[in-house]
Amino acid sequence: MFFRAWGFFVVGLAAAACGSKSGLFEMGASASSGGGPSSGGASAGGSSSGGAGNTGGIVDAGPDAPPPLPDCTYVLHGEPIVLFTYGDGVRSPMLARLSAGSPGVAARIAFGLIHEHFWHPDIRVADVAVGPAWPDGVSVTHPMTLYGIDAHSGGQVIPAAEPSGGLALFYYHADEASPNVTPGLMFRRFDTAAWKPLPEVFVEKKADYGYSIAPGPVASLKGASSQGYVVSYRGPVETDGAYITSTSVRMIDAEGAAVGAPVSVDAPGAYPGTGATTVWGGTSHLVASNARPCPGDAPECAARLTVASLGKLGLSTTATVPPNPNMRARSPLVRADGSDIWVAWREQLVLSKPENDPPSTLRLVAIDPNGQLATVPWQTDAHPDAGAELSVSDQGVLLVWGERVDPKLPPQTVGHSRLRLRQFGKAGQELQELNVPTTSLTSGAAYAVVTLAEPRALLVAWTAQAESPSSHAVAYLARFDCSLPAGE
């Protein structure tokens, strides 16, 4: 078998033992239709300087500043392992780095999953130590612990804003079987020293989907600034029959309390409405969305990538990328590492239906801290099962997505699906493409990534069918070691 079964978790039990293309994003490069340097951009990354020869946001910080870490290419280290299973299956992995690791000290990763049981999906989180050895250096130091109750539309787990520390969760809580539960979007911190969740806080009761949560400074009602978060979410609008939604962003403080009123991202529209994610850009909070320039499904009204800055007067659009002809943009991701900011999204035919597995275009573009385009968008054709995951770090920029390869194969057979990794340097140059065969992936966001400093590596988690006909989906974990590009 390709995978090595290793970890196991059940409620009430402790966890067991524990041909690539190259191109450079440059303003002014000629357009092309493939995956070349100027052909239009998929998901997020980071750059703070535009123009030809942009350096991906690296600036001279003085003679005493350490040199920037070099880009790296990845090499799969050993075989992927099965880290967690659950009676009725798992899905939607979430990784949050608690510590990056150092010589002699293992890294700590918060590993979140949605665990299915009956019809109540719960978010649980475990503490995983990752040392240099693989897989013997991997251990579960705190078992899976209930964190998000009745998480019917997923959630996001991130390291909490400083100085509070720990974890922060933003998710939709609802009990579809009980009229006594008030549904809504919740914020919840997690004490990682005691390994227990803290009280839930309602962020918005009239909302049913949380897109993102990003730490950064927020201004209080008195004008003072402190660390908190900006969240983005979608909620229904009262109408006579049609399901109309509205998307908003809102500042909350470090404890989850609202700071000011919500700000609309786009005019209300038909489901699924406008998708939006946020990031702190160094000078302001940036919001990437697929807002429409006009109502309707006509090609000229197709949703496009829009970047806006969140200020005291609301959102101010700073950049837009029109879609390719007859295509519409889906919800984008925006990620950052310092001043390196990237946005990734996918585009599909305007009238396409996801169940028909329509061809997609993944696009990627760098954004400077003021929200302006810093590179010409890049693109590649793909058949992702969901939008790509995006990682921006001192190791470079990485897109990860899943796709079906041979649907005729049984879902528990490796080769039914695969993960695709497309890696770029911090300046935007393509470095490599990797493929990881797997069993049938779960629906939705089935993959997550996080980087380590010691060993300098990338962890990729995904949820897919176990390699046995009668089993449910399990959580896999793979490690990719970082090495210098050829010639360095």
Image (cartoon, helix red, strand yellow):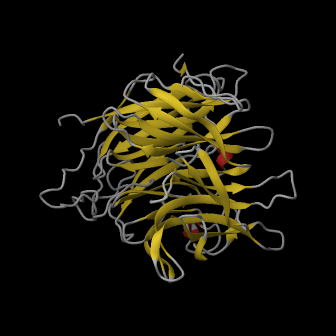
Is residue 373 visible in the rendered image? The answer is yes
Q: Determine the residue positioned at 31% across, 63% down.
A: 48
Query: Would residue 161 be found to the left or right of residue 365 on screen?
Result: right
For this rendering, which residue is in front, 280 or 298? 280
Query: Would residue 40 be found to the left or right of residue 183 on screen?
Result: left
Q: Determine the residue positioned at 73% across, 29% down.
A: 87
For this rendering, which residue is in front, 323 or 391? 391
Residue 211 placed where, x, y %? 59, 59
Query: Would residue 73 be found to the left or right of residue 137 on screen?
Result: left
Considering every residue shown, the one lying at the far left of the view is: 63
Q: Is residue 322 above or below residue 45?
A: below
Residue 350 location, quadrant: bottom right
Considering every residue shown, the one lying at the far top of the view is: 1
Is residue 307 visible in the rendered image? The answer is no
For this rendering, which residue is in front, 284 or 260? 260
How many labels sit on residues?
0
Q: Determine the residue positioned at 66% across, 23% down.
A: 410
Could you tell me which quadrant the C terminus lies in? top left
Residue 5 placed where, x, y %? 57, 20
Considering every residue shown, the one lying at the far front of the view is: 194
Residue 337 location, quadrant: bottom left
Residue 152 placed where, x, y %? 72, 50
Residue 200 placed where, x, y %? 67, 58
Q: Is residue 50 above or below residue 295?
A: above
Residue 441 location, quadrant: top right
Could you tell me which quadrant the N terminus lies in? top right
Q: Is residue 303 above or below residue 394?
A: below
